[in-house]
Amino acid sequence: MITAWIHFIGKLILGLLLGLLAILYCAQRDPCIQNVVAYHLATGFEKAVNCHIAYTVKDLTFFAPSLTLHEIKATACDDAAWHWRIKECTLSFSWWHLLFRGLIHLNLNASDVQIYSEVTNNSLAIFPHIKTMITGPSEIPLFIKTLNAQKVQCTIHDTDRNRTYSLTFDSTSKKIDRTLKSQWIIHDGSFKTAAQTYCSAAQGTFSLEVPETITHFPPLHANLKISTAVTGIAQTPITLYCTGTWHDRQGTLAITSSDNQLAVHTCTVNLNSPTPVIFDAEFPLAYLTMLMPEYFIEGLTGTARIKAQSNGFTFDQWQSTIEVNNLAWHDITLCTQSSCNADKNAKGLMVEGTATCPFIGLVRINAHNANTETTHFTAYAVENISIHGIQETIPANTRLIDAQYHAGITQGSVQAPLANSSHTITGNFFYQQPQGAYEFHYADYGVRGTWSNNGMHQSTLLYQNVPVIDLMQHSGTNIMIGQTTIDHLKPLCASLLHTPLVGQGIVNAQLGYDKEYVTFNLALNDGAVRLPHTYNHLQQLSAQGTYNTTTNLLNLEHCNGSLYKGTFSLEPAHIILNPSTTYWHLPLLLDSCLITLQKGMFATVSGSFITEKKIDQSPLIRGHLIIDRAQLNEQLLSATWISSLIRALPLHASTESPDASCNITVETKEPLRVKTDMLQTTASIRLHITGSLTQPQVSGTIQLHGGSIMLPYKSLFITKALLTLNPDNFQDPLIDLMAKNSIKKHRVSLQITGSLQHPQVVLESTPPLTEDQIISLIVTGTHEDSLGAAIPALIIQHLKSLFFDTKQSPLKTADNVKQLLKPLRRVHVIPRFTDQTGRGGLRGALEIDVTDRLSVQLQKNFSLQEDTRLEVDYLLSDDISLRGVRDERKDVTGEVEMKWKF
């Protein structure tokens, strides 16, 4: 009986259980039951975390309690700017924990999660909601046991800075011993503003351990390993690698970049230390201008290293050391190296340091702010500053810059007195985001202009406060272009070149800057600028080069010019503009250039010169000058002219420049044409110049090719002439000259030997004549004593000056007189003061050269009453002549004269 009851009760219980299970199975598939269960859970969730939730029920299971919801969306009840959306989420728990422990251990599995929250006043809007979800509502015995989320996309928007942070990840979280342990796998992340994306494609892992009770500084445990592609802070995209840890109340963070330019060596936060934050990082300055444009002007480049520590989390007190290297703005080098210490305390901010700047050297910089809105800046010269190009020095400890920053405006002044003169470099500058202005002056020179964050806009060069040239920035480049005229350049060139600039033309200029290099391009087209001391003028000029502000090296890549006659080029040329290290290399090439070597000589020349000075060596000038064609209107056989020829070459040294060695060859391509009142010939020149500028040594020869020496009665034809220059005394060359001609019935020769300053003159004739007779013959055309004794002696005394002096000779005739007497060039008047026949009286003769072979002579005695004597001479050859005579007594005679040589 009892057994039957037991079987009955067992079957009854089994039936009840089966029925209950059937009811539960049917109920869990009933949409009404699903909505009721989901409604109560959602209502409790809304009250617990203070939000509104919308959803769609997909599945409900009572046996293994779970609820699957679809298209869940949660929004804040207090209009906080956050929401999240889940495409599908499954909530499950264990009956065992609920029945025996009285707790709901909730397991969440979500996929396709989208989270959005705004940051306002540095506060994350969704943070209170997340905090409540992690700790669980206090009135419900509920806590999240596990949380698995797939394809989570989290977006945070900072409304104050208009920045957006985005992160896509998968996460697995589990609560163990009242601690939530979470592991995130990051697939993608980005950081961008409305204008630009700074980082993207973030990938890595993140692990986190959060205690159930969250305080302001919870004892978290976290590890981070992440890499991200960064754009917008460098010219090309880079990748950042970040690793960090946090344990209890302290943590560290390290960051490196793929280009090895950015490195956060140490970032340590220790909540138990009196200096809780220690920071050591180095990075390019361009990163700051991209990330914080409101504080750093655009175009800054360079590297910085910052070592800092704070005395609290309020950052009211901190100390730092800042090092900046190769600071530049739009490729203009501002500072090569800088180091300063900054100290922020209750009294304000104090910065002290030094900087090494181009053209200036080492300067001391100070800045202070006494907790006001104004920050003061000063800069001092640590040592004497040598200013290249003007040979001036700024004394040490001179205050160079005095400036202040207030309400977004930076303005200051420059006042630098010079030690070597009474001049002072003065100037002022002004900057207010995004543009500024400047003006600086030195003596008669000045510059003023404007600039903006994206580069230089306009600059004007001044001389005596008058604009010389206006330069404008070429759009989108670091190039400034301008145009000026020769008239604007005349005052400046007169001061720099110490000679007036004569002519007209337009000069185009182009200046550029690339890091430490300044590039320039100058061009003169269709000009007419007269070159000093010549009859040539410059028509076109093109010059291009660079200047290194760090090494002070001027590199003239090419310089080509076209003259009215000829061209020249100077390329490539190199000059170091540094008083302590002097170096230059200047190759000059001439092609058929018309020049005036000295007054009265015109020539077209070609050739090449190289002027160079190596470090710790004396200058050297070497080259080869070819005189293509030339004409000389001065006395060639003159020591004075030869000395002037050497001085006319570009070899003379100034008192300010060092002495230089020479190695120059001068030669003629075509013989030099010489045309003076005394000499008409052609000459070949070959000279070699050695020694130094102050003491040149010239060797070589000057050879005359034919020609004639112009004498009062008849010329002598040059048969041989050679001048040999001695290096020891080039102003007194050796001479070997021979000139001959037939005058009347005599063969006259002139031979000059010795040196130009001490010549030996020998006159000979055939038939033989005395020297006085030869002088009389070449002057008057007769060897008879018609000049007496005084005149030949006077001619012999001045014969050297006749041949070797460039000054006007008493025996020369002016050109206009020559032209006037040209019809009478074959008529000679011969006075005679003695009478060989003993008849006495004053006699005179008139000689007419009918041809080179036929001559007629009329003689008259003015003291006696007698007829005129007539003589007719005809030269059959050099050795045979005929003469017919009608004397004063009217007797007619004839003579035949023959010469034999034995």
Image: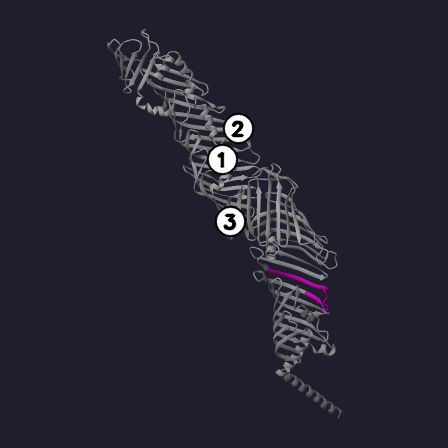
Which residue occupies 65% across, 85% down? Answer: 23
In the drawing, what numbered circle is on residue 694?
A: 2
- Residue 212 magenta: yes
Q: CA distance from mark 2 to mark 3?
A: 46 Å
Q: Is residue 421 above or below residue 688?
A: below
In the drawing, what numbered circle is on residue 472?
A: 3
Q: Earlier in the sequence, mark 1 or mark 3?
A: 3
Q: In the displayed image of the protein, which residue is found farthest to the top?
A: 838
Residue 557 in the image, given as x and y percentages of width and height:
49, 42
Q: Is residue 549 left or right of residue 561?
A: right
- Residue 751 magenta: no
Task: Determine the secondary structure under disc 2.
Answer: loop
Mark 1 = which residue? 499
- Which quarter of the rendered picture does the C terminus lie within? top left
Badge 2 crowding class, 10 Å Cα cut-off, few under 14, some 14 to 19, many 20 or more, is some
Residue 619 in the image, given as x and y percentages of width and height:
53, 33
Provide the residue span drawn in magenta.
Answer: 208-228
Residue 139 in the image, given as x and y percentages of width and height:
73, 75
